[in-house]
Image (cartoon, helix red, strand yellow):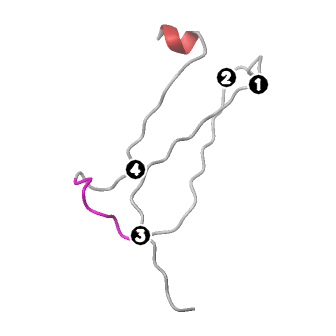
Amino acid sequence: RSDFNDGYSLFVFNLNPSEDTDALSPVSNGNLRLEIRFRVPLPHTTTLIVYACYDSILEINSK
């Protein structure tokens, strides 16, 4: 809690639908929106860093 009060925080979300992390999820496309609202406007500019790690499939066709 002291880190949050000092301006540092870390929130982690697992968006993987299955518990088995060795398996690939079905291919899907979409958007992710993050909306944050504060009770009081922040006194300084704030930086948000998003780190995403995911399995992917690269498909190359003849076209």
Residue 39 numbered tag: 2
Per the model, the C-alpha gap separating discs 4 and 2 is: 27 Å
At x 57%, y 91%, the residue is 63
Residue 57 numbered tag: 3
Magenta region, residue range: 20-26
- Front residue of 63 and 6: 63
For discs 3 and 1, the disc positioned in front in the rendered view: 3
Q: Is residue 6 magenta?
A: no
Side of 36 relative to 28 (left or right): right
For discs 3 and 4, the disc positioned in front in the rendered view: 3
Q: Is residue 24 magenta?
A: yes
Question: Which is nearer the N-term, disc 3 or disc 2?
Answer: 2
- Front residue of 57 and 33: 57
Name which residue type carries label 1.
Thr
SS for callout 4: loop
Per the model, the C-alpha gap separating discs 3 and 1 is: 37 Å
